Image: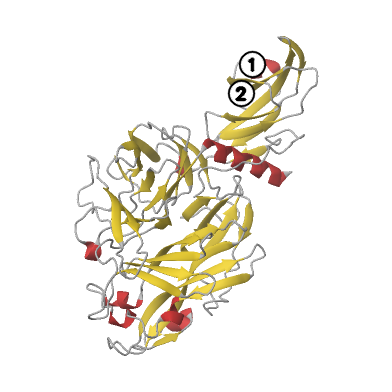
């Protein structure tokens, strides 16, 4: 997640924006119009409704904005509304020109219908008041008071349960929805992964999952899946056969499984680098791993997060079911270190017990590893935590926990029998002041910002209204993100430049 950007100069528009007749999936809108050399002030009048006469328009104005620039971002009050607007040009408080009427509308979607979904504020923002919160699942963006301002439109192959939604350094949005996509603020597809099975050898595709990141060189890195079947279940002599999805469905007595891949694409969709877990099984301790609940997990390490340290050329790859993080050299693919449990009898573990079923990995600006620790091995009753860890710098050094914040559940009227289990989902992101933005994921997806001194700076709970019992209940979320107002405005103007 990119929170602070060095923004390029605003693009220059001579067109009228929003474009005539356009339908927008957001309420925070970029307005642009021709400047006038004789005018020292522009007044934008916006009315709710579609009008072409002055008499009808005047009584319906919902927004008046005075500006010295012919380019301004304005927040509108409603989704699902037609709007009419015009510009009044003035000089020294005297009107010298009035434009004709222009028209556009904002779309409506159930995900921004506040009678169905809401972000309930638990602790009002003390800092980051001008930020915005995005949520996976429905693909929404909220302001810090819980008002929805944007959603992914149901167009262009989109409109489902998206995951790992991020805001890039180039003014775009990335996420996974059946495929890996990059879009702009309007929902126009800028890039999508080829999903051709070139790496995993499967005709159906690469099975992208969990993490998709745009790199600083405009390449894309994403997790994929290689399906396998295990020829033996002996803890010391397991062999693996790479198979297709079609063969995986056959009941031939072999154990099916999933092993992770990492794929890097260039902007044209060419594979420029890849890594496969299956290439590193020989001689590893994976044969000694035995799941305590479901034996199928024996063959599903479940990689669910990565962080690419582009400066130092290393990738940190997290595995939920193995309770471990691998440090991988780039581009050689060599495993430099393994943090977490070791399953070979008598072997030394580096960091065993420091995290369990973790779901995010990143580096602080000080160079420490941080994770969102679901802390729920075998679904035992425990609370998740944000954990900051110091890597060993020598063979004699240890993998050390240097900071931790344990998450909490706020008082809430949970439905009868509602399970509060933290076994999956969630994420955490270090912010510029070294506080952390966190989404607790699972079935209780509370979001909050906590300072380094462990003070809550903001918190909220995404909820949906259950018509069956007439109550609000927590809305399951995968991950969440946070962006600044500057990033939001960059998204808006970048989307307009795509059209024109």
Q: Is residue 277 above or below residue 499?
A: below
- Give the quadrant of residue 294: bottom left
Q: Earlier in the sequence, mark 2 or mark 1?
A: 2
Reading the image, the residue beneath label 2 is: 47
- For the point 54% across and 61% down, which residue is it? 180
Outermost residue on the right side: it is 37
Whether residue 208 appears in this view of the structure is no
Q: Give the numbered dot on residue 58.
A: 1
Mark 2 and mark 1 in contact? Answer it, CB < 8 Å.
yes
Q: Residue at x 35, y 87 (%)?
A: 254
Q: Quadrant of residue 271?
A: bottom right
Task: Decide: is 331 above or below 82.
Answer: below
Residue 288 is left or right of residue 106, and the answer is: left
Quadrant containing the C terminus in the rendered view = top right
Measuring from the top left, give residue 464's x and y in whole percent.
36, 43
Tell me if 264 is positioned left or right of 466 in this view.
Answer: right
Nearer to me, 309 or 32:
309
Mark 2 and mark 1: Cα distance apart in space: 8 Å
Tag 2, which secondary structure? strand
Element assignment for label 1: helix
Q: Establish if 175 lies above or below 287.
A: above
Work out whether residue 163 or residue 343 is closer to the camera in this orientation and state it. Answer: 343
- Considering depth in this image, is 129 or 348 the residue closer to the camera? 348
**How far from the left and from the top, in percent, is residue 161?**
46, 55
Residue in the foreground of this view, choosing between 383 and 350 = 350
Q: Residues within 10 Å of mark 2 (few under 14, many from 20)?
A: many
Percent x, y for residue 272? 61, 71
User: Could you tell me residue 313's position as x and y percent?
Assistant: 52, 65
Q: Is residue 273 above or below residue 434?
A: below
Disc tally is 2
Task: Judge the density around disc 1: few (<14), some (14-19), many (≥20) Cα neighbours within 10 Å.
Answer: few
Residue 370 can be seen, yes or no = yes
């Amino acid at each position: 997640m990119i929170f602070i950007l060095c923004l390029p100069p605003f693009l220059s528009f001579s067109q009228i924006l929003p474009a005539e007749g356009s339908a927008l999936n957001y309420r925070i809108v970029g307005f642009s119009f021709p400047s006038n050399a004789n005018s020292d002030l522009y007044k934008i009048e916006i009315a709710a409704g579609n009008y072409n006469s002055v008499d009808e328009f005047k009584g319906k104005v919902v927004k008046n904005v005075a500006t010295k620039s012919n380019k301004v971002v304005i927040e509108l009050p409603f989704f699902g509304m037609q709007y009419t607007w015009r510009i009044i040009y003035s000089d020294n408080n005297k009107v010298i020109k009035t434009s004709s009427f222009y028209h556009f509308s904002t779309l409506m979607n159930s995900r921004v219908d506040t009678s169905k979904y809401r972000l309930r504020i638990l602790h009002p923002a003390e800092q980051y008041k001008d930020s915005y919160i995005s949520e996976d699942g429905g693909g929404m963006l909220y302001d810090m008071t819980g008002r929805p301002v944007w959603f992914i439109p149901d167009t262009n192959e989109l409109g489902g349960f998206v995951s790992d939604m991020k805001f890039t350094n180039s003014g775009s949005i990335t996420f996974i929805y059946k495929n890996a996509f990059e879009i702009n603020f309007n929902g126009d597809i800028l890039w999508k992964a080829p999903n051709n099975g070139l790496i995993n050898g499967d005709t159906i595709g690469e099975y992208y999952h969990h993490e998709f990141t745009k790199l600083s060189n405009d390449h894309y890195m994403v997790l994929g899946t290689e399906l396998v079947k295990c020829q033996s279940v002996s803890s010391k002599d397991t062999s693996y056969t790479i198979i297709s999805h079609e063969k995986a469905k056959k009941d031939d007595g072999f154990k099916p499984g999933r092993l992770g891949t990492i794929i890097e694409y260039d902007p044209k969709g060419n594979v420029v680098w890849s890594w496969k877990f299956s290439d590193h099984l020989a001689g590893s301790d994976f044969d000694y791993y035995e799941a305590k609940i479901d034996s199928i997990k024996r063959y599903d390490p479940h990689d669910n997060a990565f962080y690419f340290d582009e400066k130092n050329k290393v990738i940190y790859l997290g595995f939920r079911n193995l309770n471990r993080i691998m440090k991988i050299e780039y581009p050689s693919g060599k495993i430099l270190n393994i943090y977490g449990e070791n399953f070979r009898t008598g072997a030394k573990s580096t960091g065993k017990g420091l995290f369990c079923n973790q779901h995010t990995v990143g580096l602080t600006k000080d160079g420490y590893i941080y994770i969102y620790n679901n802390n729920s091995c075998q679904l035992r009753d425990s609370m998740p935590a944000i954990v900051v860890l110091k890597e060993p710098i020598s063979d004699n050094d240890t993998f050390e926990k240097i900071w931790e914040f344990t998450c909490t559940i706020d008082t809430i009227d949970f439905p009868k029998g509602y399970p509060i289990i933290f076994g999956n989902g969630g994420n955490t992101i270090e912010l510029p002041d070294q506080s952390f933005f966190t989404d607790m994921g699972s079935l209780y997806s509370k979001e909050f910002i906590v300072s380094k001194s462990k003070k809550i700076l903001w918190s909220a709970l995404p909820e949906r209204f259950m018509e069956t019992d007439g109550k609000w209940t927590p809305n399951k979320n995968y991950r969440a993100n946070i962006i600044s107002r500057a990033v939001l405005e960059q998204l808006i103007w970048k989307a307009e430049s795509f059209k024109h």
